[in-house]
Image (spheres, rainbow, N blue to C red):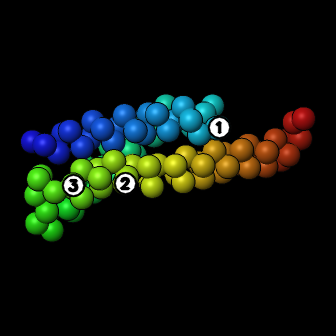
Amino acid sequence: MQIILALVVGAAIGLGLHFLVEGRPTRGVVVAPVTGALAAGLAWTIMTWAGIGTDSIWLWLSMLVAPVILVYPVLVALARTRVARDAAERARLKIG
């Protein structure tokens, strides 16, 4: 049941990164929190399956670090891809 804590913390970190990374209008509001929850939950699961207990600091640190390591590059890549595709589509349609 403690994995729920990891999911909530990961979603909160993802939500914070959603507002910190530029290009917010180019992506959905749910992408960052879901990706953060996924990263934290996956890190928690892998660490507990590896035998690391809840009394270890590494389990808790992985829950905090994994969302930052995964969500930030995903948001930057999504924003850049969207801007590039929008520009290509505008050029194809000869708009502006």
Q: Residues within 10 Å of mark 1 (few under 14, many from 20)?
A: some
Q: Which residue is mark 3?
A: 57
Quarter location, residue 83: top right
Q: Residue at x 10, y 66 (%)?
A: 51
Q: Which residue is mark 1?
A: 23
N-term-proximal mark, 3 vs 1: 1
| Residues at marks 3 and 1 touching, judged by CB atoms closer than 8 Å | no
Q: Identity of the amino acid at label 2?
A: Ala
Residue 17 percent location from the top left of the image: 50, 38
Disc 3 element: helix
SS of the residue under disc 1: loop
Considering the numbered disc 2 on the image, is that residue within a helix, a strand or a loop? helix
Q: Are marks 3 and 2 in contact (CB under 8 Å)?
A: no
Q: Position of residue 58 (x, y in %)?
A: 24, 58
Residue 89: image location, x then y, percent: 77, 45
Crowdedness near tag 2: few (<14), some (14–19) or many (≥20) residues, C-alpha within 10 Å: many
Amino acid type at mark 3? Ile
Tell me the tag on residue 66.
2
- Viewer-nearest residue: 41 or 16: 16
